[in-house]
Image (cartoon, grey):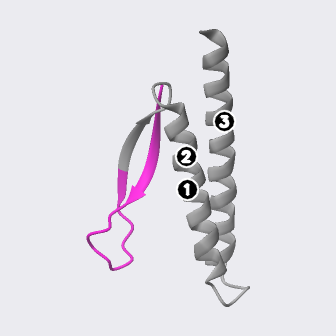
Amino acid sequence: MYKQLLGYCRSTRQGCKLPIKRQFRLDTAPVHAEDYFLERAAKCRRLAEKIANPADPALAALLELATEFESKAAAAKRQSVSARAAS
């Protein structure tokens, strides 16, 4: 099973968000998928902490994204546990 992730172009550095599709194979490396999602969630939370204005919509978006990454990490962990149980 492949999971498509949405990335952004880092070469422009102009705030331009050009979607880049990456494929991450969850069934071959579920531990890596869990680590990846947890790292992304932590990064979103660190970025959110640096926003001074609590009314900034970016703050809410980052916290929502962090929650989404944490739920994906939990799903990857459940998948790895079920894959180990099946084998």
The extreme top residue here reads 87
Q: Disc 1 or disc 3, which is closer to the eye? A: 1
Residue type at mark 1 is: Glu
Residue 25 placement (x, y as % from top left): 43, 31
Residue 39 marker: 1
Mark 2 vs 3: CB contact within 8 A: no
Q: Is mark 2 in CB contact (under 8 Å) with mark 1?
A: yes
Give, as a single range, the part of the protein colored magenta: 1-20
Circle 1/circle 3 CB separation < 8 Å: no
Q: Using the rendered view, name the quadrant where residue 72 is placed.
A: top right
Of the residues under marks 1 and 3, which one precedes in the sequence?
Answer: 1
Q: Depth check: give the residue in front, 15 or 41.
A: 41
Which residue is label 2 attached to? Answer: 35
SS of the residue at dot 3? helix
Separation of marks 2 and 1 at Cα, in angstroms: 6 Å
Q: In the displayed orientation, state which residue is furthest to the bottom.
A: 52
Secondary structure of the residue carrying tag 2 is: helix
If the image is split into quadrants, where does the C terminus sit? top right
Instruction: Say left or right for 16 vs 36.
Output: left
Is 19 above or below relative to 25?
below
- Mark 2 Cα within 10 Å, few/some/many (few <14, many 20+)? some
Q: Residues within 10 Å of mark 1 (few under 14, many from 20)?
A: some
**Image coords of residue 23 (percent x, y):** 39, 39
Q: Residue at x 45, y 40 (%)?
A: 4
SS for dot 1 = helix
Q: Residue at left 61%, top 83%?
A: 50
Q: Position of residue 60 (x, y in %)?
A: 69, 72
Label 3 sits on residue: 75
Residue 17 locus on image (x, y percent) = 39, 67
User: Disc 2 residue type?
Assistant: Asp
